[in-house]
């Protein structure tokens, strides 16, 4: 079981379309930890930590997002796994 951490910056029509809540729900289903938030420039930013296969699954999901979203680009940074979160939450 390989643990991973990724930092995503998601561009497109991703605010006001339930992206954060849907991301939180999907991350919790997959047992991932971290956070998701809107950025001031209209993007969504997230950090995910967990099993490698579940990280790959959430990245695939983020390329599509909830039904009203239109994702145009995702910047993905691999980071060192830190195990610093207890759960997955929305940051406001």
Image (cartoon, rainbow, N blue to C red):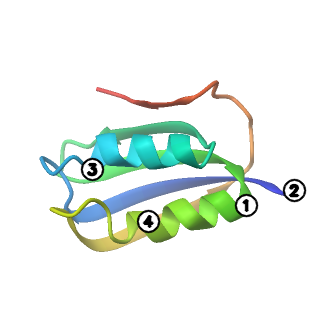
Distance between the Cα atoms at labels 3 and 4? 11 Å
The numbered mark, 3 or 4, whose residue comes first in the sequence reads 3
Give the secondary structure at mark 1.
helix
Count residues near mark 3 (Cα–Cα under 10 Å), then give few for <14, some for 14-19, many for 20+. many
The numbered mark, 1 or 2, whose residue comes first in the sequence reads 2
The image quadrant where one finds the N terminus is bottom right
Name the residue: 27% across, 50% down. 19
Which label number is shown at residue 52?
1
Distance between the Cα atoms at labels 1 and 3? 22 Å
The numbered mark, 3 or 2, whose residue comes first in the sequence reads 2
Q: Determine which residue is flagged by label 2.
A: 1
Distance between the Cα atoms at labels 3 and 2? 28 Å
87 in relation to 68, above or below: above
Residue placed furthest toward the right: 1
Closest to the observer, 36 or 67: 67
The numbered mark, 1 or 4, whose residue comes first in the sequence reads 1
Residue placed furthest toward the front: 29
The numbered mark, 2 or 4, whose residue comes first in the sequence reads 2
User: Residue 87's spot in the image, x, y percent?
Assistant: 58, 28
Distance between the Cα atoms at labels 1 and 2? 7 Å
Q: Determine which residue is flagged by label 4.
A: 61
CB atoms of marks 1 and 2 within 8 Å: yes
């Amino acid at each position: 079981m390989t643990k991973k951490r990724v930092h995503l910056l998601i561009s497109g029509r991703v605010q006001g379309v339930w992206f954060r809540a849907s991301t939180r729900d999907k991350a919790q289903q997959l047992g991932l930890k971290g956070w998701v938030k809107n950025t001031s420039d209209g993007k969504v930013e997230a950090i995910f930590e967990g099993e490698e296969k579940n990280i790959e699954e959430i990245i695939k999901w983020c390329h599509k997002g909830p039904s009203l979203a239109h994702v145009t680009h995702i910047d993905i940074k691999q980071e060192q796994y830190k195990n610093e979160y207890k759960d997955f939450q929305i940051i406001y």
